[in-house]
Image: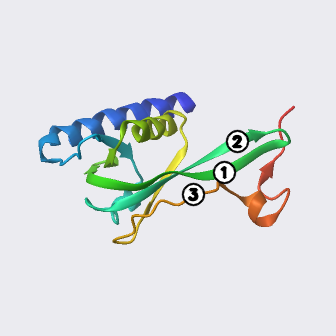
């Protein structure tokens, strides 16, 4: 199953990148940034438009000493949307990322983490220190934990 998901991811990235970068001349990539394609759910594309600013979150299972815990982290903030890709089954956003941000986005994709975007309000440009979200923090010890397999 994981091999199939990786193969599908590679195909989506290749086609999305081809579609996005075929029109690279129309993209206005700011100096020092890279146009980076990140696959999305189709429903997100109904709301995300070029010129929007987004925060990128990833959700993953972290192995802790007492089991596995699902966490969500905001890894990128105030990211500019250059374009969107919506071609058949292929859906993605083209983001203006600096080289360091692009590495974190690609790492999240490679690790097969769940990636979501939140759309910022117009004019909201502030960066905020963000703590990772965990149900254990919200509801107390034991909430949302999975026992480790020993």
Q: Earlier in the sequence, mark 3 or mark 2?
A: 2
Write down the residue under mark 1: 71
Residue to which mark 2 is pinned = 62
Q: Say which element carries label 2.
A: strand
Q: SS of the residue at dot 1?
A: strand
Front one among 74 and 37: 74
Disc 1 or 2, which lies upstream in sequence?
2
Residue 1's spot in the image, x, y percent?
57, 33
Residue found at x 26% / y 61%: 51
113 displayed left or right of 134? left
Neighbours of disc 1 within 10 Å: few (<14), some (14-19), many (20+) = some
Asked whether 39 or 101 is in front, the reply is: 101
Contact flag, marks 1 and 2 (Cβ < 8 Å):
yes
From the top left corner, tell me how far across and down residue 27 is, in percent: 18, 47
Crowding near the residue tagged with mark 3, few <14, some 14–19, many ≥20 C-alpha atoms within 10 Å: few
Q: Please tell me which residue lies in front, 90 or 30.
A: 30
**Front residue of 13 and 88:** 13
């Amino acid at each position: 199953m994981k091999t199939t998901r990786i193969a599908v991811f590679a195909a989506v990235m290749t086609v999305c990148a081809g579609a996005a970068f075929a029109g690279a001349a129309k993209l206005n990539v700011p100096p020092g940034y890279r146009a980076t394609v990140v696959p999305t759910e189709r429903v997100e594309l109904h709301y995300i438009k070029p010129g929007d600013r987004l925060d990128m979150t990833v959700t993953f299972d972290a192995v802790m000493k007492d089991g596995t815990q699902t966490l969500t982290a905001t890894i990128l903030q105030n990211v500019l949307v250059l374009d969107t890709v919506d071609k058949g089954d292929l859906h993605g956003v083209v983001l203006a990322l600096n080289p360091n941000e692009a590495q974190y986005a690609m790492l999240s994709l490679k690790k097969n983490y769940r990636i979501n975007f939140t759309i910022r309000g117009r004019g909201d440009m502030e960066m905020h220190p963000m703590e990772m979200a965990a149900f254990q923090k919200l509801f107390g010890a034991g909430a949302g934990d999975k026992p480790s397999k020993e």
